[in-house]
Image (cartoon, rainbow, N blue to C red):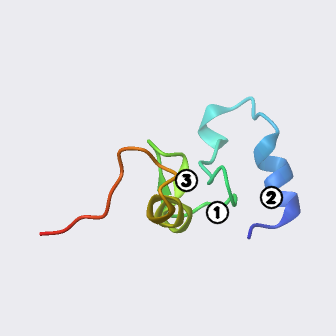
Amino acid sequence: MAKKSKIAKWKRTSPYKARAMNRCNRCARPRAYIRFAGLCRVCFRQMALNGHLPGVRKASW
């Protein structure tokens, strides 16, 4: 979980687009961000396994 100060700073809109950081919309994790889902890999995996993400399923080959 990210620090509360970092989350508050992220929620404020920055006037400079270059300073904007992608964070998970669920837990505010800054790393391993998946753009099309708006989630980090940890939250993406949990939600996909629980069936909360339509069209996403576990790979099998």
- Residue on which the image places disc 3: 39
Who's the residue at 30% across and 64% down the image? 58
Q: Foreground residue, 21 or 28? A: 28
Residue linked to disc 2: 6
- Crowd band around label 1 with a 10 angstrom C-alpha radius: few (<14), some (14–19), many (20+): many
CA distance for labels 3 and 1: 8 Å
Is residue 35 shown above or below 48? Answer: above
Marks 2 and 3, the one that precedes in the sequence: 2
**Label 3–label 1 contact, CB within 8 A:** no
How far across and how far down the image is residue 4, in percent? 87, 62
Q: Is residue 35 left or right of residue 31?
A: left
Q: Nearer the viewer, mark 3 or mark 1?
A: 3
Q: Residue at x 69, y 61 (%)?
A: 27
For the C terminus, which image quadrant?
A: bottom left
Question: Can you tell which mark lies on residue 52?
Answer: none
Counting residues from the start of the chain, the first of labels 3 and 1 encountered is 1
Which quadrant, please, contains the N terminus? bottom right
Q: Earlier in the sequence, mark 1 or mark 2?
A: 2
Measure the alpha-carbon separation of dots 2 and 3.
Answer: 17 Å
* Amino acid tagged 1: Arg
Q: Secondary structure at mark 2?
A: helix
The amino acid pointed to by label 2 is: Lys
The disc label shown at residue 29, or none:
1
Residue at 80% across, 58% down: 6
